[in-house]
Image (cartoon, rainbow, N blue to C red):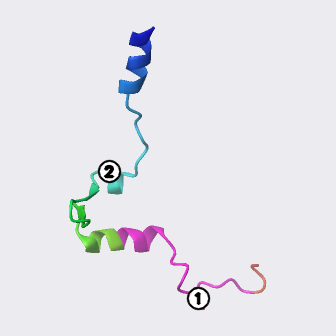
Amino acid sequence: MKDKHNKKKNETKSIKVRDSIKDFDIQINSFGEIVTNYDVDKINEFLNQNIQDKKIPPSPTQMPTEGEA
């Protein structure tokens, strides 16, 4: 019985990850600094393309007109 229990602990789940960030690795070193294998500009570019900033209101071209809402 113990062997079956140990097998379950050793198995790792595969996580679905976008291909664009598949190789992304982020860690915090002993000084509390964030260390990544990607350039900060690449991270910001990805976030700008995929995440809408809630602090910045949408521009008038992005706002729906009265007929669309």
Residue that numbered label 2 is attached to: 22
Residue 16 has which mark?
none
How far across and how far down the image is residue 29, in percent?
Answer: 22, 60
* Most common secondary structure along the magenta stretch: loop
Q: Nearer the viewer, residue 62 or 4?
A: 4
Q: Is residue 20 above or below residue 63?
A: above
Secondary structure beneath dot 1 equals loop
Quarter of the image with the N terminus is: top left
**Image quarter for residue 66?**
bottom right
Quarter of the image with the C terminus is: bottom right
Amino acid type of the residue that numbered disc 1 sits on in the rendered structure = Thr
Give the magenta range: 45-65
How far across and how far down the image is residue 14, in percent?
Answer: 40, 36
Between the C-alphas of marks 2 and 1, the distance is 33 Å
Q: Is residue 24 left or right of residue 67?
A: left
How far across and how far down the image is residue 18, in percent?
Answer: 40, 52
| Earlier-in-chain disc, 2 versus 1 | 2
The reply to whether the magenta stretch includes residue 47 is yes
Residue that numbered label 1 is attached to: 61
Q: Residue furthest top?
A: 1
